[in-house]
Image (cartoon, helix red, strand yellow):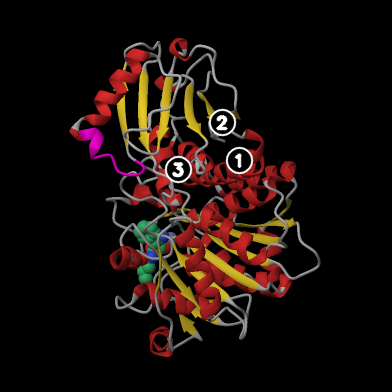
Amino acid sequence: MTQPVEISFTDTAPEKLAEHEGRVALILTATDRLPGGLPRPTRQAATRALDSKAGQALKPGQVLELAFPAGMAAESLMLVMLPHGSTQSEARIAGAAIGARLGKSHTLVMAGGHAQANDVALGLALRSYDFSVYHTDQQDGDGTRPHVTFLVKKPEELAKVASDAAALAEGVFFTRDLVNEPANILTTSDFADRLQAMEEIGLEVEVLEEDELEALGMRALLAVGQGSEAPSKVVVMRWNGGGDEAPLALVGKGVVFDTGGISIKPAAGMEDMTMDMGGAGVVAGVMRTLALRRAKANVVGLVGLVENMPDGKAQRPGDIVKSMKGDTIEVINTDAEGRLVLADVLWYAQERFEPSAIVDLATLTGAVIIALGHDNAGVFCNDDTFADQILTAAKAEGEGAWRLPLGKPYDDLIKSRLADIKNTGGRAAGSITAAQFLQRFIKPGQPWAHLDIAGVALPPSATDLAPKGATGWGVMTLDRLVRDQFEAK
Ligand code: BES
Ligand code: MN
Ligand code: ZN
């Protein structure tokens, strides 16, 4: 997987800053507060830059870059504005500005006693993500990776937060890699193998194969995969870091490619459907982070891995399938496949684990993009307290999330003439009827939230903390949720 840049913290200033090659970033709390120890010509150049119109206009988190600064061997001097008392998100964005300019060389970040050095480091790590495995010209033969040194007053005080942040960055990178991978590489089997490999970091991983899914009665999930050569799978990942309390369950939609099936999608943009396993990708990334930071909580991650393809064995519009729960489903549109997968995995999660709460994540509907664009995931929840906890966690981590309603009038839209329920409710309120469908597979009294991440998993342009491509949206929110609500303090 793509490894986050290596970041170390030290209180030992380089002997000769002037001779430091690579890049140097200064974290400034004000335009008139340059740190000591700068070579004279460098100090003069930086002062001029900060006195300029651009310098005076620097907002928290913004950067002014001087190329080949006078008096230094460095190729670049970054002046990073971060006043005391900036928000966590400004500190991460400041780090991201450095991370976006890392290059291949060593970067020295002079953070002094800044209280937010750790968030700067996290933002730097997240934004420096680069998925270029398939750019053959960018594979450097010597394998050198950039590394970063933070010069801070008390490195030992940062050690625990820094290692937790590294665990978080690694989880986010794992998710981004999975989402960015094309479907000929990330098949259901390859996906399951990558999850199984997390046994190395202490997760218990089980892969359920088609015969077992059949025996469990997961006909809704299997129907989605039956038009593909790739075998359908359910993977269960367990992190038991708590006591004997019931686990939090995270459930992810893992459609490795969504052609739409017989209700086939138009060609334009279909290539983006390699990201239709984004929910499963987030579940996997969170489980990785929890294991790496040895979270004191019980969490089980379940993903349904299938490929939605049209062939002679594919399900058709009009088919009626029986879910593991026992409810029959009329498949109006084979492109509304994610809910069929989740129906069975959600039911299985409740039957087997009796979780204290469930969060499912899915790139479920195009309609959520119409409603919320690419800046907010849609949040559906049957429990106001739980909804608030999720929204609070998302806000704390700077990940956009917006609650949308559930309710009987929407549920009425998915009544079927022939079966217990149908898998589409028409154009109106498309994301809500999808959520209502899922709720049919949630037991009464079971706290549950559904996050529709179709708009935020792979937005069309770079975000504050991610280059263009997969964002890993949700890993930080769920890690925060576990920390704040499910972890023994
Ligand atoms: N995977 C898609 C949803 C999607 C769309 C994700 C765009 C990311 C970007 C989902 O399986 C789907 O096709 N949903 C249909 C449902 C419809 C047939 C009721 C949709 O949104 O059009
Ligand atoms: Mn679909
Ligand atoms: Zn889909």
The numbered disc on residue 180 is 3
State which quarter of the image contains the N terminus.
Answer: top right
Q: Is mark 2 within 8 Å of ligand 1?
A: no
Query: In the rendered image of this protein, does residue 102 appear above or below residue 310?
Result: above
Magenta region, residue range = 54-61
Q: Earlier in the sequence, mark 2 or mark 1?
A: 2
Q: Residue drawn 42% across and 83% down?
A: 414
Q: Which mark is residue 91?
A: none
Where does the image place residue 81, in percent across and percent down from the top left?
Answer: 36, 38
- Residue under the image location 30 percent in, 19 percent down: 44
Q: Which residue is mark 1?
A: 162
Q: Which mark is residue 7?
A: 2
Can you see residue 307?
Answer: no
Q: Residue 143 lies in what quarter of the image? A: top right
- Nearer-the-camera pick, 367 or 202: 202
Please name whichever residue, 440 or 267, is drawn nearer the observer in this view of the structure.
440
